[in-house]
Amino acid sequence: MTQKTKPATTSKTPRNKATLWWIIGGVVGLGLIVALAASIATEPEIDESIGFGEPVVEGDILPVFAAGTEDVAVGLTAPTVTGADWNDTPVSIEPDGTPKIVIFLAHWCPHCQAEVPVVQDWVDAGNLPPEVELISVATSTDRLRPNWPPQEWLEEEGWTAPVIMDDQIGTVAANYGMSGTPFWVILDGDNTNLARISGEVSVEGLDAMVDVAMSSLD
Amino acid sequence: MSVQSISFYNNFVTILTFVALIASVGLVVYRIVKGSEAAADLLGTNAIWLAWIVALTCTVGSLIYSEIIHFPPCRLCWFQRIAMYPLSVILLVGAIRKEAQVKYYALPLALAGLAVSIYHNLVQFNPSLEGGSCDPTNPCSARFVEMLGFIDIPFMAGAGFIVIAVLLTFFTKAKE
């Protein structure tokens, strides 16, 4: 009976050494990356309530807007909103006899980021008649998303329209049937919904919205 | 998860993204200078292991973003996941079996994923490609991460797909 003898593995082969170096190099490299990432990580002091308000909404909810179809909410009375901007200055959407254009904005939405300067330039050029009020609602705020908080963004853009800060569950947006941002609602002086639009609007579109709002005064 | 932890994690994956891109460029240059034979001999079957490590890192990295940091994946993110996640299994099997033929199964996935990553980056730089408004829950055009002004999650995924594709294309020699 013969017995097979196993060759002794006393020394490391070049292949094993190479693998060992790969592992050591990988661990050291990963450690360096972790250390570098940790050294440049920032720790801003976060106030969880920043970017949110406590608006009060009264009235019947408008159905969710469906783009590309006839708005079933035209002619319905939009809810009354009593809120405030980030400085606690009261802002409301109420049936006070003034037609309104309401724009809902999300700080992280690139379409809103593109729309805000267009609208502000349009306002600065004097295209918003005094008979019509432009009100904005900062909604869908999320501190984990870019361009937070919304007030810093709007201040940087020189935004002059009054702003209502929506709450953490987007109560105002939900009550107005928002389906996407930016979202527009045109109201007459009695808070009756004349039209709703989802998406970016051109200068011509803004002029058309003013025409719709003004037509309610006739 | 705290903002500091997210900041740390974003920095970490951004550095990995740079490492992946620099490695890809280095490997392509090596392939051009030294030729196909030298490239195939440089790493041997370790190229498949390296590609698997990249795929695994991308898979785990995306799961950390969605399951721990709670960034919801958008539609285009899911298409990239569909390409990346199987790679972390296919390449492991190929590496264990030292099966260079695995490149023929893995490469189409990597290239398809890269194509989606490129389109996703274009959408983030030009949101009108995906319509005129943002889905309030999770639009593909919104950037959850914005490092150095241009590195976001699809950019990171694209870097992963690129390095995997380079390793499989130029450094894995399949038997004829």
Image (cartoon, coloured by chain):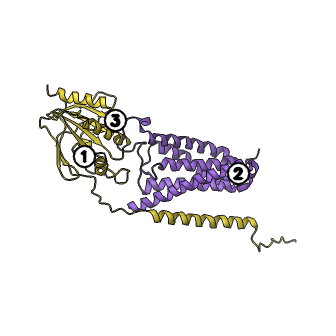
Chain colours: A yellow, B purple
Q: Which mark is residue A171?
A: 1
Distance Cα–Cα, label 3 vs label 1: 22 Å
- According to the image, label 3 marks what residue? A200
Marks 3 and 2 share the same chain: no
Numbered disc 3: secondary structure? loop
Q: Decide which of tag 3 and tag 1 comes sooner along the chain.
A: 1
Residue at 48% in and 49% down: B153
Dividing the picture into quadrants, the one containing residue A177 is top left
Crowding at mark 3 (Cα within 10 Å: few <14, some 14-19, many 20+)? many
Q: Chain of mark 3?
A: A
Numbered disc 2: what chain? B
At label 1, which amino acid type do we have? Answer: Thr
Q: Classify 10 Å Cα crowding around label 1: few (below 14), some (14-19), many (20 and above).
A: some
Dot 1 lies on which element?
helix
With respect to residue B136, does A216 lie above or below? above
Badge 2 marks a residue whose secondary structure is loop
Query: What kind of residue is marked 2?
Result: Glu
**Pointer 2: what residue?**
B99
